Image (spheres, grey):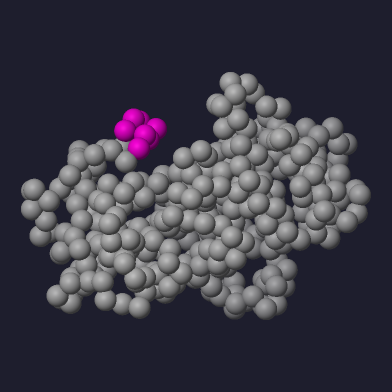
Amino acid sequence: MGIGIEEVHQRISHCFERVEVKQNSRLYLKSLIDRVDRKNCWQLAEAAGEENPYGMQRLLCQARWDADLVRDDLRAYVMEHFQDPTAIGVIDETGFLKKGKKSVGVKRQYSGTAGKIENCQVGVFLNYVTPKGKAFIDRELFLPQEWVQDQVRRKEARVPEKLRFATKPELALRMLQRALEAGVVFSWITADTIYGNSRALRRWLGEHHLPYVLAIAANQYVWKPDLSRWQAKSLAAKIGADGWQRFSVGEGSKGPRVYDWAWIRLTDIGTDLAEGWGRWLLVRRSIEKPEEIAYYLAAGPENTSLVTLAEVAGTRWAIEVSFEEAKGEAGMDEYEVRKWESWYRHITLSLLAHAYLAVCRVYSNEKGAMIS
């Protein structure tokens, strides 16, 4: 089975009707995985041997093609190489630092990339993680309320007229819905507190029989089997010394990621729980800094173990690695476009380039040879 970048482009060639657009998309995709200092249209064009960036700029800004069709091919490509019944879906967001006010969706908002409030765009992503490999299968741009209500800015950025405000958990739900409709199977879903605090998202996951381990805020309320209501931090404070277990949930950049873990059984009453499921408050405590505690709301099969829940929670690190790879190797954050459609076009092609590199790594490890 060929897995070269030409074969990858062949998969998406049906998305481009005009010959020159198809050729520019091939050059763009190849240049994204090239060793270019900064992967904007000018330098990508130079790497591709083009005299000017106009062809690549037209590809992102003016040419007729649907980035969602490429996204579907991206998902199919990832499934072909990484599909696994134990796959975990990881949802998270990342920021794209920008100057000015013209880039679609930009505003002063929290950026996990910078670790503080910055002028940036925020994208929400769905990562498919398996023992064999991991890659993104979907993306959505978060459009702040002030953008949704500003008709002038919307028109300038070519935001679709029918688009309405959607929270980040709602964007995550859209991506999960698309994945399920495409036949993607997840064994678990995990995400950070923005998504874990969403009761609507948790209910949807339960109704669709998708087990989850979602981080929640310390002040989120949970219900014990006796239906008493507790804040997560107050209930966790009741855990005795013998209630903690210490183990690793995988390798990190600095070695094994070892924490203390504990769990408390919660009520199984609720329409969002499938038959034979249980619900737990999962608690993670730092060994070096015991005051640093994270809380998770988990729901899944009754026979689920504490180790399994902890391992699912620990899988969230995978999407952080994928963000670093996609930005460092496939130019995901180095675009210079301002329009709605252009953002989706660049990001989707970048994610496809990243998925190709992820597949190359797997084949290189398996066969001991580099793939070009």
Q: Magenta residues, as a range?
A: 250-256
Quadrant occupied by the C terminus? top right
**x, y (%) of residue 104?**
64, 63
Residue 53, picture quadrant: top right
Can residue 97 be seen by looking at this rendering?
no
Residue located at (51% from left, 67% from top): 173
Residue that extends furthest to the top in the rendered view of this protein: 368
Residue that extends furthest to the right in the rendered view of this protein: 19
Residue located at (12% from left, 59% from top): 237
Nearer-the-camera pick, 298 or 197: 298
Q: Is residue 93 magenta?
A: no
**x, y (%) of residue 244?**
15, 48
**x, y (%) of residue 100?**
61, 58
Residue located at (66% from left, 47% from top): 77
Quadrant occupied by the N terminus? top right
Residue 221, picture quadrant: bottom left
